Image (cartoon, rainbow, N blue to C red):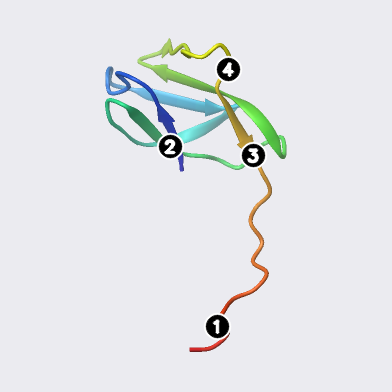
Amino acid sequence: MVTISGHFLGAGSSVSVLLGNQTCEFYGRSMNEIVCVSAPSAHGLGPVHVSVSVDRAQLETIQETDLQFEYIDDPKVQRIEPEWS
């Protein structure tokens, strides 16, 4: 799950989020958040640009830097405690 925070994000009727060139499946939103489910990276690990559109209008960021999402390695379980119950 990926949460994008901002202002007036509940406006409009259709929302689209891209992580790089992968669609982030829309899950829900409020006036201050958009939540989506990330797809596996098509290009491996590392940062990708985040693009948010509402009703086909590209949303601009408030910060000077682009929005980024970083794909990292999957978690690896090393130990479970207790080993019995």
**In this picture, residue 6 sits left or right of residue 17:** left
* Cα gap from disc 4 to disc 2, whole angstroms: 18 Å
| Front of the two marks 2 and 1 | 1
Q: Residues within 10 Å of mark 2 (few under 14, many from 20)?
A: many
| Front of the two marks 4 and 3 | 4
Residue behind mark 3: 71
- Mark 3 belongs to which amino acid? Tyr
- Mark 1 belongs to which amino acid? Pro
Residue behind mark 4: 66
The numbered mark, 3 or 1, whose residue comes first in the sequence reads: 3
- Point out which mark residue 36 bears: 2
| Front of the two marks 1 and 4 | 1
- Residue 78 drawn at (x, y percent): 68, 69
* Cα gap from disc 1 to disc 4, whole angstroms: 44 Å
Q: Residues within 10 Å of mark 1 (few under 14, many from 20)?
A: few
Residue behind mark 1: 82
